[in-house]
Image (spheres, rainbow, N blue to C red):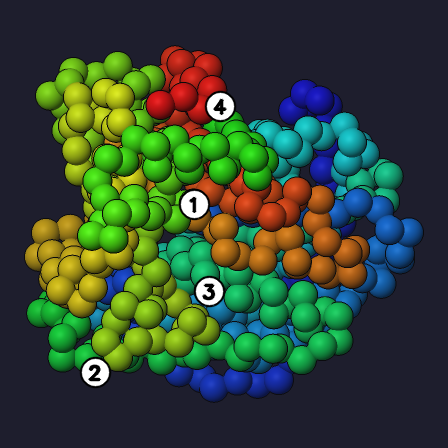
Amino acid sequence: MKMDDFQVKITEVHLVSPADPTERCQLPFTTFDLMQKRDSMPYLQRVAFYESTGKDADLLVRHMKEGLAKVLVDFYPFAGRISFSGGGMPELDCNDHGVELSVAEANASLEELDTSQYSPLFKKLILRGNYEETTMTGTAPLFAAQVTKFKCGAVSVAWSFDHLAVDGIAMMHFITSWAEASSGKPISKPPVHDRYFERRNKDLAAKVDDSAPFQYTFVDPTAGVESRIFSFDEDEVEKMKKLVLEGNSDQQENGEHESFTTYEAAAAHFWVELCRARDLPKSQTTRAQIAVNCRPKIVPPLPQEYFGNVVLPGLAVSTIGELTVPGSKAVAARLLKKSIRSFGMEEIRSQIQSYHENYRNKNPMAQGLTDGVDIFFGSSLRHPLYEVDFGWDKPVAVRHGRFLWDGFCFFDPSPRGGRSMDITVHLLPPIMAKFATTIKMLEP
């Protein structure tokens, strides 16, 4: 279906505030939060597609609105706004101003959309979710959602959020809690809002000039970028992992080969194949940045239910020459494994201090990622994306709602279940054409 043929009309727009008054306060953004707010970071978006179940859609939408108000009582910072009342640094003003929920109707049936791949049509399923240009003014909601009804009775539920406020783990926690509340269930895992943990932890505290203005001007980094989803079933995932293990000649003391997680092996496969597709000089340095959840790595650790950002980039560095020879996928996996598993307080402390000294108003997770050399990995493989039930049962597909920058690869669970996965890759078209011809061949 062409963009002009697919029409979506918004019929309702609600500003949903917490069902009960919540604590009015100003909460600080941590360095983990501030690192996410850079000029090329848009509101991040997801779209979940649900087939028709014959249930009353209007009734379910009403339950979703009521559930959203209920869940915001526990997740009250999300109903706030960004404020600069304390000086040059932004703060989270918990003022109950609310989040946005839109209801829309589409002129097509769900089967007319190809949900197996990203489509620019998805932009129309979250029409009011692009607030990156106004978020710092203190007027924009930190979260927006849109429920779109299709002619066949199917629906999509799309959401959009400001990465300054939360990371993907916290966002998934909010979405699953919203689904619980919409079904009349209590929230199974209440959030934790201790945004002062960084200031209390002497091993994390950095020298910060709070009076220096925090500048932000959104610049779209996706010009000319193409997005494509590569799906791997369980057999293909297992073969991908064997490729890495077969190329690993190093053995542990007990004679067994070094082990890798499925994610480490799959990321290594993608890193090597992208290096080959880019056809760069063998002496060229290439870096892989992989998002690391620091909740369990901070001392003392933060609970998994902490509602904010606690993700930093693990960094693996190699050369094109090292990663394009036989056996190189084991080399890449070993580098990625080390960047994740050796990530601890020393690296966390170093990145926090480095941000304030060198990268203010920039995101260290994106340094060099748009130069056609590096690669960035994100993952929701452990997120219950296909368990989110707002009343239409489980989704049949969950996709990203917009492009990200060149070199970004995101690993998602597949609706087929098990260890199958869908990997969304963003590349420039000439590189994508080469990459697509080899990535599924699963050769050394």
Q: Return the residue nearer the eye: 399 or 303.
A: 303
Tags 3 and 1 in contact by the CB under 8 Å rule? no
Left or right relative to 295: residue 280: left
For the N terminus, the quadrant is top right
Residue 406 x/y as whole percent: 35, 30
- The residue singled out by tag 3 in the image is 170
Residue 277 x/y as whole percent: 33, 17
- The residue singled out by tag 2 in the image is 200
Q: Return the residue nearer the eye: 117 or 413.
A: 413
**Gap in Å between the C-alphas at discs 3 and 2?**
21 Å
Name the amino acid type tagged 4: Lys
Question: Can residue 123 be seen?
Answer: no
Secondary structure of residue under mark 3: helix
**Gap in Å between the C-alphas at discs 2 and 1?**
36 Å
Residue in view at x 63 percent, y 67 percent: 178
Residue in view at x 21 percent, y 40 percent: 250
Q: Which mark is residue 273?
A: none
- The residue singled out by tag 1 in the image is 262
- The residue singled out by tag 4 in the image is 440
Question: Can residue 169 be seen?
Answer: yes
Secondary structure of residue under mark 2: helix
